[in-house]
Amino acid sequence: MKRVIEIEKLGQYRLDNSLHTWFHDKVCERIGAADGEKIGVPQTMVEEYRACVDEEFEMLKEVSGEENETKAILKKDAECDRLLSFILGVIRIMRLSPRQEVAEDAQHLYVLTHDKKRIQSEGIGRKPARIDSLLNDLKKPEPAAMITRLGLDEAVGLLKQANEDASRLQRERSNLRVRRKRPSMTQIRPKTDEVYHEVILQLQYAYKNNVPPIDREAIAELVRHLNEHTAHARMTYKKSLAQRRARRRQKSAPTDADNPV
């Protein structure tokens, strides 16, 4: 039997967060299930490794949760944009009304809201305040009466509610970020990798020295499984990389419209 055990290497820094966590979870699971005395890895090291992997899992959950929060904010932001477009569009077109009093109301509101037309191009963080400013202008007695005559009360009310919802969602996301105060994945991953390499060195050291109760066959069996996980992670990474490259080529490829016959 060889004196040195070969453990496949993996460029873990290349893996995305999900694949990185999957790989370490599988490795940690295998090592934790083995007899620590036979493989030469102390329980404290296994526990430290598991703690690192669990922290990565928690971070993935938070990232996923934050993505859902962001989607909700973007959806509400799009609703505000649609309502703004409707309100400002009606005001603009009603200036052509055959009824003089309606056309005059629309013209007055058009002048009042003209500088608000760029609200939709504002960043999500600034937009709620700009919409609040518009709504404050529209709720004053004279403009409010004009809004009613143009039949825009419901739309303005819906915009007010949508904007309040958008502001609330943004506050909730900010508060969650403050409460979490967790390190980022870029801080967590190197620690996991470091503990993993310590475990690997421990396995190699135990195998080479073969001091009882070390069992080389137990280490060899464990390493076979670890190498399988490494091969799977490498294959998954390469497949993902090939797909990304294919998408980039597809986007950059000229279309028939670019090259008319």
Image: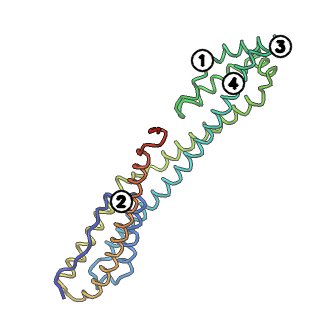
Mark closest to the chain's N terminus, 1 or 4: 4
What's the CA distance linking mark 2 and mark 4?
48 Å
The mark found on residue 115 in the picture is: 1
What's the CA distance linking mark 3 and mark 4?
18 Å
Other residues around mark 1 within 10 Å, as few (<14) / some (14–19) / many (≥20): few
| Residue linked to disc 2 | 15
Left or right of 117 on screen, residue 232: left
Q: Nearer the viewer, residue 86 or 193?
A: 86
Which one is closest to the eye, mark 1 or mark 4?
4
| Residue linked to disc 3 | 99
Other residues around mark 4 within 10 Å, as few (<14) / some (14–19) / many (≥20): few
Mark closest to the chain's N terminus, 1 or 3: 3
Which one is closest to the eye, mark 1 or mark 3?
3
Amino acid type, residue under disc 2 in the picture = Leu
| Residue linked to disc 4 | 89
Mark closest to the chain's N terminus, 3 or 2: 2
Task: Examine the image and state in which quarter residue 206 appears.
Answer: bottom left
Residue at 51%, 54% in the rendered image: 64
Amino acid type, residue under disc 3 in the picture = Arg
Mark closest to the chain's N terminus, 3 or 4: 4
Which one is closest to the eye, mark 3 or mark 2?
3
